[in-house]
Image (cartoon, helix red, strand yellow):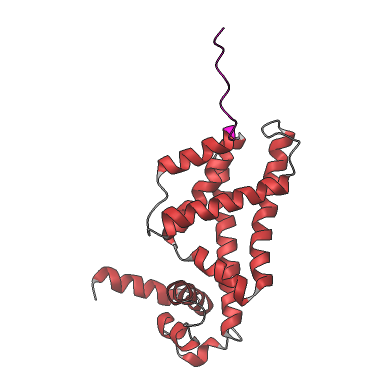
Amino acid sequence: MTVAASRRAAAGRARPPAQRLLTAAEELFGELSYRRTTVARICARAGMATGSFYAHFGSKAEVFAAVVRQLNADLRKAMAAAIEQAGDSQRDLERACFGAFFDMLSQRPWMDRIVRESEFIDPGLYREYYEHLARGYARGVRRAQLAGDVDARYDPEVIAYIYTGIGNFVGMRWADWTGGQVPQDVRDDLLEVLRRGLPPPQPRDVS
């Protein structure tokens, strides 16, 4: 084992046991799926005895739910931090939020796979994940409407779910499927479409 690997392993062991189990479970659920992941595998990845698992989680289903909720909390925290550094316009806020999501997805490319699988493992958990995100988005849209940055005719919740769908599928295509980053030109195109919409070209005046 290299010195760097030894340091990473030591840092991992220094974390609280529940967090070590959560991290190991997240990685394995993403790599193997829920069905193929076992409590024994989670404990082996975390470097803990299998019996220690039940001091923190009651079952594999319980740690899976904790992983999904942790992903949601981490994403909302990353977006909040990005917003603090962004400008005040809606375009700046959109760029910050999409950027935070795409950056997190490049670091944890399995996150959307885990969330998608939760629809079949625990449909209520799946719905909870997206409702938490959409509520935050909708509040931001409403503030932008009051500031005159977004057309107030639109339902903020509709726009929130549009953001959610766009982010999920762009991230899946350019980060999850390729294991890389969402390229900057793709991000720019996404934001430009949000800014302008898709109006038909205006006929040229030939008079």
- 9 vs 36: above or below: above
Q: Quadrant of residue 46?
A: bottom left
Image quarter in which the N terminus is found: bottom left
Residue 18 as seen in the image, left or right of residue 1: right
Residue 50 as seen in the image, left or right of residue 144: left
* 19 in magenta: no
Q: Quadrant of residue 75?
A: bottom right
* 198 in magenta: yes
Please report the bounds of the magenta region as a residue range.
196-207
Chief secondary structure of the magenta span? Answer: loop
Residue 50 percent coordinates (x, y): 48, 91
Outermost residue, top side: 207
Q: Residue at x 60, y 77 (%)?
A: 121
- 126 vs 175: above or below: below
Outermost residue, bottom side: 51
Q: Residue at x 59, y 62 (%)?
A: 72
- 65 vs 142: above or below: below
- 169 vs 202: above or below: below
Q: Residue at x 59, y 56 (%)?
A: 76
| The one of 165 and 47 positioned closer to us in this rendering | 165
Residue 190 percent coordinates (x, y): 51, 41
